[in-house]
Image (cartoon, rainbow, N blue to C red):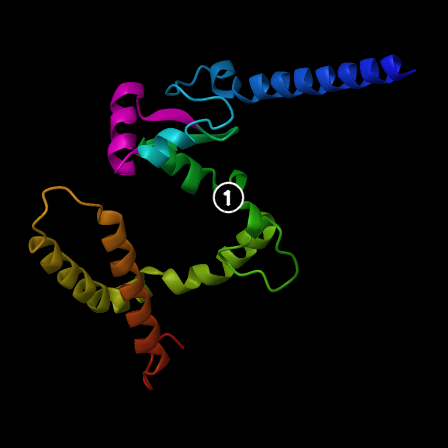
């Protein structure tokens, strides 16, 4: 009886391991089946280990783009992700075919959020499309022109800081985040406290 139980457990474990390996192979054949190039990756980790180890992500993406072209694939663990730098392709997806690509990938923790309180950055699918449709009138050409002086002021300050940058190579992403937040806050508080706001 003991031998039979041990054998059964062994068979079940073998089947589970076999199924897992087959599933992983199926995940990692995604780009190969579509004839899309991808850099060498590691089992289970995909390209995470490479991305974690490089000092500058932008340099790594630039290197892969030179080697593989303007459209290639990466694996975040087992999740396939497209990396695209073809402007015409992006315009086709985000503008002309927007109705077919109205969602985006969300982090796992964000996907657990439910209810009507979900904000723009945590929404996906039809909810995200509806919220985007509601806020789109805020970004008409006329309203963007009203924002231009504030945006230009932040960009001028940003450019002056870049001129003082002594390092030949640095991570500009942090600076981009700072100037983006600076622009958002300036516009928000300017029109929030302006008694003659033309945005109302």
Q: Position of residue 53 (x, y in %)?
A: 32, 33
Q: Residue at 67% x, 19% y: name it.
A: 17
- As drawn, 134 above or below 194: above
Among the 4 quarters of the image, the one containing residue 181: bottom left
**Around disc 1, counting alpha carbons within 10 Å, would you say few (fewer than 14), some (14 to 19), or many (20 or more)?**
few
Residue 48 visible? The answer is yes
Q: Residue furthest bottom?
A: 195
Dot 1: element:
loop
The count of marks equals 1
In-image side of 69 versus 154 (left or right): right
Residue shown at 71% from the left, 15% from the top = 14
Which residue is nearer to you in this view: 163 or 96? 163
Quarter of the image with the N terminus in it? top right
Q: Where residue 155 appears, x then y in whole percent?
A: 18, 60
When the figure is inspected, residue 17 is found, relative to residue 173, above or below; the finding is above
| Residue with the mark numbered 1 | 104
In the image, residue 148 above or below residue 169: below
Asked if residue 124 shows in the view, the reply is no
Assign the C terminus to one quadrant of the image. Answer: bottom left
Is residue 64 a member of the stretch shown in magenta?
A: yes
Horizontal relation, residue 126 to residue 147: left or right: right
Q: Position of residue 83 (x, y in %)?
A: 38, 31
Q: Residue at x 38, y 24 (%)?
A: 72
Q: Quadrant of residue 25?
A: top right
- Region of the chain picked out in magenta, as a range: 54-74
> Residue furthest toward the front?
2
| 101 and 79: which is toward the camera | 79
Residue 132 lies in the magenta-colored region: no
Residue 44 spot, x, y in % from top left = 51, 26
Residue 99 lies, with reference to residue 116, above or below; the image says above
Residue at figure coordinates x 63%, y 16% from the top left: 22
């Amino acid at each position: 009886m003991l031998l039979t139980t041990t054998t059964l457990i062994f068979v079940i474990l073998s089947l589970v391991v076999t199924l897992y390996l087959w599933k992983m192979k199926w995940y990692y054949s995604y780009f190969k089946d579509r004839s899309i190039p991808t850099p060498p990756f590691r089992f289970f980790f995909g390209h995470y280990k490479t991305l974690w180890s490089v000092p500058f992500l932008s340099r790594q993406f630039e290197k892969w783009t030179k080697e593989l072209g303007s459209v290639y694939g990466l694996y975040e663990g087992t999740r396939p992700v497209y990396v695209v730098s073809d402007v015409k392709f992006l315009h086709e997806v985000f503008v002309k075919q927007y109705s077919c690509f109205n969602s985006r990938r969300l982090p796992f923790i964000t996907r657990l959020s439910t209810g009507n309180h979900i904000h723009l950055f945590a929404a996906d699918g039809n909810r995200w499309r509806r919220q985007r449709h509601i806020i789109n009138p805020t970004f008409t050409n006329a309203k963007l022109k009203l924002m231009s002086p504030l945006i230009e002021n932040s960009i001028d300050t940003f450019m002056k800081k870049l001129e003082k940058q002594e390092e030949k190579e640095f991570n500009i992403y942090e600076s981009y985040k700072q100037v983006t937040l600076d622009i958002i806050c300036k516009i928000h508080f300017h029109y929030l406290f302006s008694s003659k706001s033309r945005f109302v």
